[in-house]
Amino acid sequence: MKMKRVASLMLASVLAVGSLAACGNDSGSEGGESASSDTFKIGGIGPTTGDAAAYGIAVQNGAQLAVDEINADGGINGKQIEFKFEDDQNDSEKSVNAYNTLKDWGMQMLVGTVTSTPCTAVVEETHKDNMYQLTPSATAVESIQYDNAFRICFSDPSQGTASADYIADNGLATKVAVIYNSSDVYSSGIYQNFATEAQAKGLEVVAAEAFTADSKTDFSVQLQKAKDSGAELVFLPIYYQEASLILTQADRMGFDTTFFGCDGLDGILDVEGFDTSLAEGVMLLTPFTADAQDEKTQTFVKAYEEAFEIAPIQFAADAYDCIYAIKAAAEQAEITPDMSVSDLCDAMKTAMTEITIDGLTGSGITWDESGEPSKEAKAVIISNGTYEAM
């Protein structure tokens, strides 16, 4: 992402959050205590600085846009929403600190966290407090391991399985190489389930090459092994920063193949200094593309671009759907802001299994008691510098 765009986006985010009028009292509401505010206080946590900032900023903005729309339309059960977002720099300790800061503010429900490892740390805290938590994008199974936690996105196992199914069912390849981060729960979790499903679907994994957080700049060995294996497609269950390096290095060594990834690749077109022409033809499993022509998507994209002067990525759509899912469940449960955090959570847990929403990231989205969503997997291809639905 260009630095100017990051700076302007972060400024827009700060101004958007800062423009909210403070309502009621900021005291918290834990356990059986009642909230003193006449508004619903929803907190958010994710990285707005650091390597994963593109994700956190998108989530902050997408959630804020939904909050503003809902408030303008009368709120939830006639009550307005206050939304406050804290930066965790994709760090577990900072994420827990952010959670405690939001509790002091009076948070009653949490949208977050954005990334898996911090979310897994924070869900321990929300579970102890019996606070309702809905993550837009944390994909690790452990991130929602308790009954108070739900997610909008697919889990790592689901993404791995769905990717293998999509590649096989659409005849994209029969021989597949995988380059993954063995030190990252997101990447390794997707890979493990991809490998299992690939075998079941008749795909041959001809090379499975790992790297770690300490060796994520030089991928020449992994790429050479993938090339020598005769792979027709390279599966990249990794984040966009590393993927941009892999595409650059593959081009330098003359390795011309098809690349396929998951939602972690969303954002690759905004990497500073990356030649985006190298991403032409890259496919990724993602439930949202800003170029989709349906009315719901185009309305959202227009509003997002007007508010933040940048096109939304999938993480923004995930967060937008999170807020509307909260609204649907809150109205199903008929909750009010004066309820305790624990009572709100208990009511929301039941309501989440009773609602169905038509969101940006899927139609007819439902949840079961595990907190996992049920929705159709979709893929996009990068063409002419944009994401196009496949």
Image (cartoon, rainbow, N blue to C red):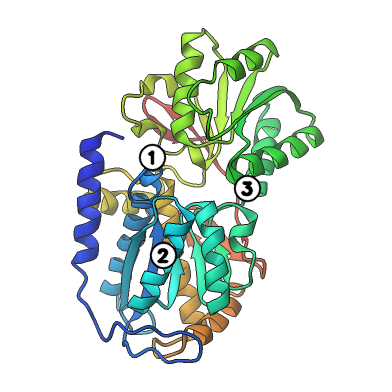
Using a 10 Å C-alpha cutoff, classify the residue at mark 3 as few (fewer than 14 neighbours), some (14 to 19) or many (20 or more).
many
The residue sitting at the top extreme is 254
Q: Is residue 171 above or below residue 88?
A: above
**Camera-nearest label, 1 or 2:** 2
Are dots 3 and 2 in contact, CB under 8 Å? no
Q: Is residue 152 above or below residue 84?
A: above
**Camera-nearest label, 1 or 3:** 3
- In front here: 172 or 2? 2
**Element marked by disc 3:** helix
Using a 10 Å C-alpha cutoff, classify the residue at mark 2 as few (fewer than 14 neighbours), some (14 to 19) or many (20 or more).
some
- In front here: 77 or 243? 243
Residue beneath disc 2? 97
Q: Quadrant where the N terminus lies?
A: top left
Structural distance between the alpha carbons of marks 1 and 3: 25 Å
Residue 291 circle label: 1
Are dots 1 and 3 in contact, CB under 8 Å? no
Lateral position of residue 114 relative to residue 195, left or right: left
The structure residue drawn at horizontal position 20% and vertical position 45%, both measured from the top left corner, is 8
Structural distance between the alpha carbons of marks 3 and 2: 26 Å
User: How many marks do you count on the picture?
Assistant: 3
- In front here: 283 or 255? 255
**Element marked by disc 1:** loop
Amino acid bearing label 3: Asp
Dot placed on the residue nearer the N-terminal end, 3 or 2: 2
Q: Is residue 256 above or below residue 237?
A: above
The structure residue drawn at horizontal position 50% and vertical position 20%, both measured from the top left corner, is 218
Residue beneath disc 3? 156
Amino acid bearing label 1: Asp
Q: Is residue 357 visible from the viewing direction of this image?
A: no
